[in-house]
Amino acid sequence: MLSIRKFAIIPSLLLILTSCSGQEERQQPQYRIESGHDLSILTTTDTHYLAQSLRDFGPAFNQFLAAGDGKQLGYSREMMDALGYDIGIRRPDAVIISGDLTNNGEQASHKDLAKHLQQIEQDTGTRVYVIPGNHDIQNPWARRFDGSRQYTADSVTAEEFRTIYNNFGYSEALLEDGDSLSYLAAPSEDLWLLMLDTAKYGDNKKLGHPQLEGGVSSATLKWIRACGELAAANGAHIVAVMHHSLLDHSEFIQEGFTVDDHGQVIDTLLQSGIRTVFSGHIHIQDISQYQEENGNRIYDIAGSALSVFPHQYGLLKYSSANQTMDYSTAALGMEAWAAATGSTDENLLGFKKYSEANFRKRSATRSYSRLSADPAYAGYSDAELMAMADVVGRLNEIYFAGTARTDNAAVIATEGYRLWQSAPSGGLRSYVLGMTSREVKDNQQLHVELQGP
Ligand code: FE
Ligand code: MN
């Protein structure tokens, strides 16, 4: 068992903290696991929580769901309860959520989510650490759904965000950045978390929408170096957490998803001794790596969204004796939680099936309307078009889950896929063939050696 004790300031740490001038400093982090102990972290992202008070199941909300990207917004509360249930069983030492905590930055959603997180900390003794994503702050899209109408809802400012999530990182930060909501936290003496706020919300009001792109300012880059020096002086490893991707993950989406000027950010993180990054934003499970000429390597583990099928999270195990980290994914135990709490909701009791069908159907329906409106596909029967559309739905599902390595073969064996191979060239055909000819790698597991390159 890990022993958790009140943080006692060691003289060398105090010395270094006070010598880092120009940064906001905190000298009394509250909890710490002693050096030489293992650490387990549950990593999740894009919870996109929507407060129950902001929606009914009327036409406006259902329309919003249908037009969306598969987020199970009607089950936000249940999803967080199920996550709390899983955390109670798995007992990780820490939980990180790498942004897009809420659907569209609604104040009510933030407050309700913070209550869930408080409950999780109380019930399980874990520590939760959060950072904002592009949807969370000053979001002009914040809405309440009532009957056949949407109404503007209050969002939050950066200051309000910091206040609401004070207990989930900020109050125990070793250092806070003066130029963003980034902070450095130490869930254990050996492994520290660089929680980077890459969201840009300053222009949201003017833009009328949340800015998609993310960045790290030069002031924050400088602050990251100070964090790296502090960790090095204390013999601690750092894992970084950010909403936007550090590395490119997809040939289909990069613009607005990979952090701006990522070369600079990669250099700074590598120079600060950081080898592992957890990100979100793309809603796709994908592990990328970058290797410098000197052999130094950095991994960016993009987690799929907790709110979207397959509703999975990551588990990171740090071994002190081996100086390694091992990452793997696990499915949210929604069904187990629903059964344990006596739920009678069939969707929850069979959540995997329900959410999967929902996800596939959404993307298949869209593809079917595209194909049936395209004169190039006029020679196909309705059944053929539906089989082809189903292939697109299944490939999308696999793409988001990051399971191409194991699941592509079954799709390639279908009649629908055979139809695509001989189909007229065009947007959807190249998408389908592109999806099945991508390099297949393991996005569910990663082993990291912390010593050496
Ligand atoms: Fe998101
Ligand atoms: Mn995002």
Image: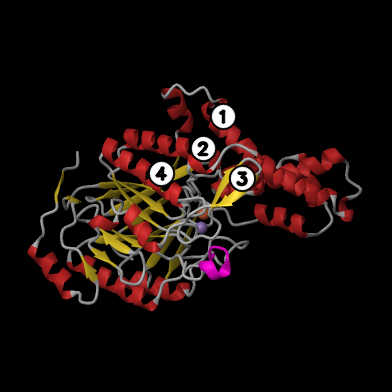
Secondary structure found at label 2:
helix
* Residue 206 located within the stretch drawn in magenta: yes
Which residue has dot 3 on it?
397
| Mark nearer the N terminus (3 vs 1) | 1
Which residue has dot 2 on it?
75
Q: Which residue lies furthest to the right in this view?
A: 379
Secondary structure found at label 1:
helix
Secondary structure found at label 3:
helix
Mark 3–mark 1 CB contact (< 8 Å): no
Foreground disc of the pair 1, 2: 2
| Mark nearer the N terminus (2 vs 3) | 2
Expressed as whole percent of the image width and height from the top left, the position of residue 202 reads 46, 70
Which residue has dot 1 on it?
347
- The residue that appears at 37% across and 41% down in the rendered structure is 116
112 or 199, nearer to the observer? 112
- The residue that appears at 61% across and 45% down in the rendered structure is 397
**Mark 3 vs mark 1, CA separation in Å:** 19 Å
Chain part drawn in magenta: 204-213
**Mark 2 vs mark 3, CA separation in Å:** 20 Å
**Mark 2 vs mark 4, CA separation in Å:** 13 Å
**Mark 4 vs mark 3, CA separation in Å:** 29 Å
